[in-house]
């Protein structure tokens, strides 16, 4: 076997070798003197530059494939902007770690009631046979409350390892939740009611549009706005007296569970300034347990009649002895006030009394006439219909809904025709001075003032604090 001689390395002139050694030494010195920040900065800049459309499309497709393979959402392309240069480089070189969300116990399932859902369809969604619904609901008389579903309601299911229902829970309101729990005999229904903490809350508002809109902006609920209108309804005609710039202050009970407001109680005190005149109201419960509203100095807010039978309606025609009738087209006395409002708007009795008529009466259409004692009588005409339980010969209470706005009889549009008689003579309801109810009893006056004065003082303090903070 013949061995070929190995080739000798090429020989370079000595001068070339010396030059190469010098260049290597200079490069080493440069790396020692100058840090690699330029290199790192360049990497960071490159990582933030946009790729060409072709490269971007390829990377987008790769990212989509990664999402499909890992079943995890792709990282935001902007996340690396907030990273350091090293983090950015590592992110570019290595795929992101998948984020694993904590999973709920396999025996716990939740469903939200959607459109068209029934308890059977919800059972099927969690793997329970729809046929078991009847058996579960029949196990307890109150269990049927689970079939009264509301859109958006959440149902929570607890299943045993065999896939059978052991517990069904649902929150039906901020205060109440219902539960079905399995035992040896079947299922037991239980209603859990949270007891709210009651505190007082304050609201101040200025009217610059309608009362309802201004109250809502101030944070007053619709029901409390209606309550305020009822409290001051004896003195303020909310259909025609409200003016821009009117103000109100309200202190009311607020129900709270776990720091969250879940409902409101009654108005404790209120103040309403209308056309420069201020009215006050304080809720007081006497020793017999009867509650009513009084002025701050103890006079009753309640009168024999409230000013308007329709809340927030528009007066379309006033009391007149020489008005031209819009349908008959001739001069005919208009012995009442017309309140225009949408069809179906509730109509309230302005005072306690006996119903003399609840039926048809000529041009008045559907009409109710109420006798209030021996002196006063009121009439409500053109009604769409009567409230349930209101009939001739029956009794009604002040503020009770007796019917609804309509356009029956001689009427050009939906409205209420309201008349007021004193000893059989028609008078203008808007100008009639209303009789007062009794003031605070002398025996309870000191107790009333002990409640009234701190409430009035608090409204003053709250308002002053609010105005001071708004000027900062």
Image (tube, rainbow, N blue to C red):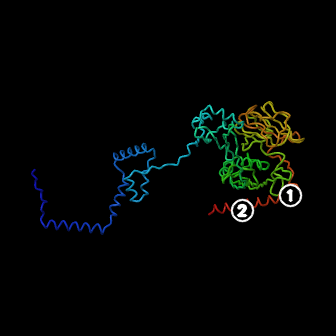
Q: Which one is nearer the viewer's eye here, 39 or 305? A: 39
In the picture, the disc for residue 445 is 1
Q: Secondary structure at mark 2?
A: helix
Whichever of labels 1 and 2 marks the residue nearer the N terminus, that label is: 1
Q: Quick one: which residue is furthest to the left in this view?
A: 2
Residue 110's disc is: none
Q: Quadrant of residue 87?
A: bottom left
Q: Residues within 10 Å of mark 1 (few under 14, many from 20)?
A: few
The residue under label 2 is 461
Q: Give the left or right position of residue 442, taking residue 465 as reference.
A: right
The answer to whether 469 is drawn above or below residue 131 in the figure is below
Identify the residue at horizontal 33%, vertical 62% (top origin). Answer: 38
Q: Quadrant of the C terminus?
A: bottom right
Tag count:
2
Q: Residue furthest right?
A: 374
**Horizontal and vertical percent position of residue 270:** 75, 54
Examine the image and state in which quarter residue 343 appears. top right
Q: Is residue 371 left or right of residue 50?
A: right
Res. 56 in view: yes
Q: Position of residue 212 (x, y in %)?
A: 68, 47
Q: Please, what secondary structure does the residue beneath circle 1 have?
A: helix
Q: CA distance from mark 1 to mark 2?
A: 24 Å
Would you identify the image quadrant in which residue 54 lies? top left
Residues 382 and 198: in front is 198
């Amino acid at each position: 076997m013949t061995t070929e001689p190995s080739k000798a390395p090429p020989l370079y002139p000595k001068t070339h070798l010396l030059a190469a050694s010098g260049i290597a030494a200079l490069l080493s010195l440069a790396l020692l003197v100058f840090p690699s920040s330029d290199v790192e900065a360049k990497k960071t800049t490159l990582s933030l530059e946009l790729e060409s459309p072709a490269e971007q499309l390829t990377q987008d497709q790769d990212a989509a494939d990664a999402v499909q393979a890992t079943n995890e959402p792709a990282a935001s392309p902007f996340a690396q902007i907030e990273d350091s240069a090293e983090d950015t480089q590592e992110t570019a070189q290595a795929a992101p770690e998948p984020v694993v969300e904590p999973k709920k116990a396999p025996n716990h399932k939740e469903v939200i009631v959607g459109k068209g859902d029934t308890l059977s369809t919800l059972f099927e969604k969690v793997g329970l046979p729809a046929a078991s619904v009847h058996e579960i609901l029949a196990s307890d008389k109150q269990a049927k409350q689970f079939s009264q579903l509301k859109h958006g309601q959440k149902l929570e299911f607890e299943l045993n390892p065999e896939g059978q229902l052991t517990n069904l829970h649902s929150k039906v309101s901020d205060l109440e939740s219902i539960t079905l729990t399995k035992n040896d005999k079947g299922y037991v229904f239980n209603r859990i009611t949270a007891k709210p903490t009651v505190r007082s809350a304050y609201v101040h508002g200025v009217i610059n549009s309608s009362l309802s809109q201004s109250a809502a902006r101030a944070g007053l609920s619709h029901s409390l706005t209606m309550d305020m209108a009822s409290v001051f309804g004896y003195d303020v005609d909310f259909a025609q007296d409200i003016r821009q710039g009117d103000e109100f202050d309200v202190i009311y009970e607020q129900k709270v569970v776990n720091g969250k407001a879940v409902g409101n109680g009654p108005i404790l005190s209120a103040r309403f300034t209308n056309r420069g005149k201020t009215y006050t109201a304080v809720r007081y419960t006497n020793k017999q347990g009867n509650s009513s509203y009084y002025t701050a100095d103890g006079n009753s807010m309640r009168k024999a009649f409230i000013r308007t039978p329709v809340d927030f309606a528009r007066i379309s025609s006033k009391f007149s002895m020489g008005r031209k009738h819009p349908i008959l087209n001739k001069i005919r006395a208009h012995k009442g006030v017309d309140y225009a409002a949408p069809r179906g708007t509730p109509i309230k009795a302005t005072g306690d009394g006996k119903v003399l008529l609840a039926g048809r009466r000529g041009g008045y259409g559907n009409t109710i006439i109420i006798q209030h004692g021996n002196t006063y009588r009121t009439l409500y005409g053109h009604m769409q219909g009567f409230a349930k339980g209101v009939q001739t010969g029956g009794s009604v209470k002040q503020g009770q809904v007796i019917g609804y706005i309509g356009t029956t009889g001689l009427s050009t549009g939906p409205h209420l025709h309201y008349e007021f008689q004193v000893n059989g003579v028609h008078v203008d309801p808007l100008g009639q001075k209303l009789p007062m109810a009794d003031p605070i009893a002398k025996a309870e006056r000191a107790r009333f003032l002990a409640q009234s004065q701190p409430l009035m003082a608090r409204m003053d303090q709250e308002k002053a604090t609010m105005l001071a903070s708004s000027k900062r």
